[in-house]
Image (spheres, helix red, strand yellow):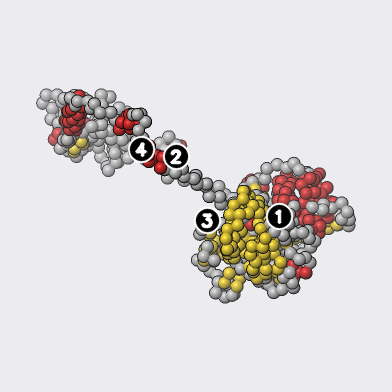
Amino acid sequence: MSTVQPGTVMVDRYRLTQPASTDLATAEAWEAHDQILDRPVRVTFVDGPQSAAALDAARRAALVADSRLCRVLDVGTTDLGAGERSYVITEPFAGESLTQIVSRGLVDAQQARALMGEAATALEAARRRGVHHCALRPEAVRVDGHRVVVTGLGIDAGLAGIEPSDTEAAAMDARGLVALGYYALTARWAADSLEVPWIAPDAVRPLPAQTGPDGVVPVSELVPHVDDEIDVVVRRTFTGDDAGAPATPADIVAALEPWGQVSVVAALPRFVQPPERPVRSSVLGAGSPAGSASRPGTPPPAPPVRRPSTGRIARAGVVGAGAGVAAGAPYGQPPAQGAVPPPPGQGAYGQTAAYGQAPAYGQGPAYGQAPAAGQSPAAAPGQPAPAGYAQAAPGQPAAAQGAPQSAAGPTTGGFASTAAPKKRGVNPTPIVLGVLLVGVVLAAVWAMSQAFTPFSSEPPPEAQTSQEATTEGEPTEGADDAAEEEPTETEEPEVRPIIDSGEQLDPAGDGEHPEAVELAYDADPSTFWFTLTYHNNPAWGGFKEGAGFGVELREPAPVSQVDLNTNGSGGAWQLRSTSLDDPTGGDLLAEGSFSEDTTIELDEAVIVDSLVLWITELPGTDEADRYRLELNEITLS
């Protein structure tokens, strides 16, 4: 049972956040966060008897750099409280797997062609570095926008225990690529059955492809208007003999190129695409259709209260509000002499309309009814007055209720404006003028003092020294001091040993890994140069007497210390001051065995332009009777 849980921190760096899905039977995946580089990662714990092979394959896959491959970031083992567990750190899985895409709809021929071409280009780049997938399936290919990503390079085959030769592995990848295209078009799997024990029992497995007398049914018989190139490569792969089948991913690339941009999800039918996010509109604009339509019986909106641009607004009294308006007086004009405002509750003619009935001539309309011709609409109780009309305050003459607003200026209803009091503050002008005046006075005093100061007749010290040096050849004190001073030697800048290049030294020519030489001095301890794995004998398995790693400096420089950072301990090495052409010659500077951090301190600094680390025995690994050197970093000082 797993002991990891959300919040667990591995190797003081990776914090696990939540479990992730995987179709591998002997693996456990987690989403995590790299606390040093502040980025999301994916952690895969590998268990079972093939865990060591999976870690070795992951280290080889880390050397392949392609944007279409899920990059391996770290490999190792750690103890989380229940014993050692092997882990592989990769980039997080982005996008959707091909299984998820096909579950929503079949991929059209052009997108299937682009998907096969992009995946084949990635695996061809890995093949040229000696790494193969050998476990292609729909769950190992993902689509992230316009990018195809192949996951599980080397790792999945390691857990599955698949160890073919390079030729067989390249052919397996080519066959798997064609099967992926067939699956995208038909939702059927044409390659070898995926009912294998290394895939989890609860994982989704595609249905097998239909077969006929000549093998798998051609895709052109199942999908109309399919590209001829795809149909031909499917027939060559799954029908007839294997003589014409593609042998490498490069054959797939050559058969399908050119292809268009990957847009698999966008090409699916609209009703199965991910839903678009709705746009919320919490407030409808005044000009929107929803805002312009009014429900039946809804009174028109009240006009905004236009307040003066300056001054404060204070509520006016009842008497002041109605002082200038009387019954029968035109709006904005003083009332006729002798006019008396009607009592509260009556209209302009002293009559009141009954609630719910039409008003008589001269009355305002009843609440809830439309006004008669020539009448002004009356506001309902508790409702604002209609646009273009002012609403009287309680006790205000009713004639003001039906009067339209004047064009001379906006009305404020029951409010009156008063001028805002002026704020009193400190006037900065006198202060600024005073400061300037003081500055002018001080400048004038200084100028006058300089003007009335008599000029000194004594020459400056430099002139005195010049005159003394020219009088009758008498040596001056400065000259004597200059004569007594002895010239000092110029100090040469310190030369530091800087590695300019490295080289794998293998006189037997058995291969090893020359492509990873630069990783031993790239200032990144997570990458390394490594040898092949040898069994039963640390002395290179008995196949050769030794091999080495040589470095050439940018210029000859003194070296007093060499630091080696490796992933193992044991073995035997020699540090020699010699050229890379003669790795076993030259002067023997030091010798010893490896540890994870090996520091070689020389008795005295040696000026060299090249050094050779000659290895006669390899350090051991975590597995018994297996020997390999992983040189993370070599530094000189």
Residue 566: x and y in percent read 62, 64
Of residue 550 and residue 280, the one placed in the foreground of this image is 550
Of circles 1 and 4, the one toward us is 4
Of circles 4 and 3, the one toward us is 4
Of circles 2 and 4, the one toward us is 4
Q: Is residue 203 visible?
A: no
Height in image: 225 above or below 332?
A: below
Question: Distance from label 2 to label 4 (Cα)?
Answer: 98 Å
Of circles 1 and 3, the one toward us is 1
Question: Distance from label 4 to label 3 (Cα)?
Answer: 62 Å
In the displayed structure, does residue 276 sit left or right of residue 204?
left
Number of residues whose C-alpha sits closer than 10 Å to that of mark 4, classed few (under 14), some (14–19) or many (20 or more): few
Q: Secondary structure at mark 4?
A: helix
Of residue 527 and residue 290, the one placed in the foreground of this image is 527
Sequence-wise, which precedes: disc 2 or disc 3? Answer: 3
Question: Distance from label 1 to label 2 (Cα)?
Answer: 83 Å
Number of residues whose C-alpha sits closer than 10 Å to that of mark 2, classed few (under 14), some (14–19) or many (20 or more): few
Quadrant position of residue 257: top right
In the displayed structure, does residue 507 sit left or right of residue 301?
right
Report the residue marked by disc 2.
290
Sequence-wise, which precedes: disc 4 or disc 3? Answer: 3
Q: Which numbered circle lies on residue 37?
A: 3
Question: Distance from label 2 to label 3 (Cα)?
Answer: 51 Å
Question: Distance from label 1 to label 3 (Cα)?
Answer: 37 Å
Q: Secondary structure at mark 1?
A: loop
**Amino acid identity at mark 3:** Leu
**Amino acid identity at mark 1:** Leu
Height in image: 581 above or below 23?
A: above
Number of residues whose C-alpha sits closer than 10 Å to that of mark 1, classed few (under 14), some (14–19) or many (20 or more): many
**Amino acid identity at mark 4:** Gly
